Image (tube, grey):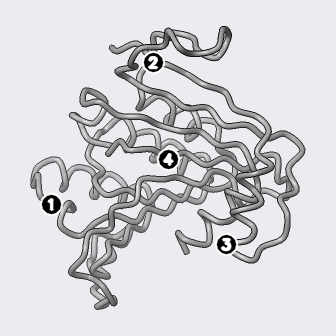
Amino acid sequence: MKNILKFTVVPLIVVLFHISSAFGQQADTSSVEWIEVYFNMPGDHSVAKEGNWIYDEADLLQTLIELIDQAQYSIDLAIYNLEHHRVGEALVDAAGRGVRVRVATDHYNRFRNRELGEQMWGMLAEAGIYTIDDAGVVIAPDGSMTERILTGASYDMHHKFAVIDILSDDPDDYYVWTGSMNLTYTGPINSNNTIVIKDSGIAEAYHREFN
């Protein structure tokens, strides 16, 4: 387990201005807004302002799993490569609680590791979770596969983000998880970062991209 460097940044006024301008959306409506940034291999922090960094014994996967475990309404996960069973099991548990779970992934990585891929997509299907990849292949809960050719199917779907509880009536429930890490067994070991964002305007922008 690697040390994690965690920054909390608030407020988000400048970021939200650019998000709103770029997407033409209304201003965010959440009353609590913050960003937390995690590094599993932090560099030199000696130049950081006192109080702007802490070391924490945790792992980058946990930054997502905690959000999945607390979700009450919805989880939309767009991930280039999903193979780590800690994440798969958390998604299955969420679906079992009645949370709507949707997963979009990259076609090439569906079964690049055949054994792990078959286990992951089979586990999600059995939990009633539909999954789709960027080539248009949908795996339904009954295990059947349908294919719809999508524009740009030959390119990588390189996103790594999740939108949590966007279906809630309360914008303060919305979260975004993102960063550089793939949800693989090597992802948490390689140098990576994850970012947790609590802000309704940013969550809505990511949700629109997912849809």
The type of residue carrying mark 4 is Thr
Q: Say which mark, if any, is on residue 111.
A: 1
Q: Residue at x 35, y 34 (%)?
A: 192
Picture quadrant where residue 58 is located: top left
Label located before the other in sequence (2 or 1): 2
Q: Residue at x 27, y 86 (%)?
A: 147
Label located before the other in sequence (2 or 3): 2
Depth order, front residue of 38/147: 38
Q: Judging from the image, what secondary structure is the residue with disc 3 in? A: helix
The type of residue carrying mark 1 is Phe
Q: Which residue is mark 3?
A: 22
Marks 1 and 4 close (CB-CB < 8 Å): no
Depth order, front residue of 131/56: 56
- In the image, residue 162 above or below residue 210: above
Q: Residue at x 55, y 32 (%)?
A: 37
Marks 2 and 3 close (CB-CB < 8 Å): no
Looking at the image, is mark 2 or mark 1 nearer the viewer?
Answer: 2
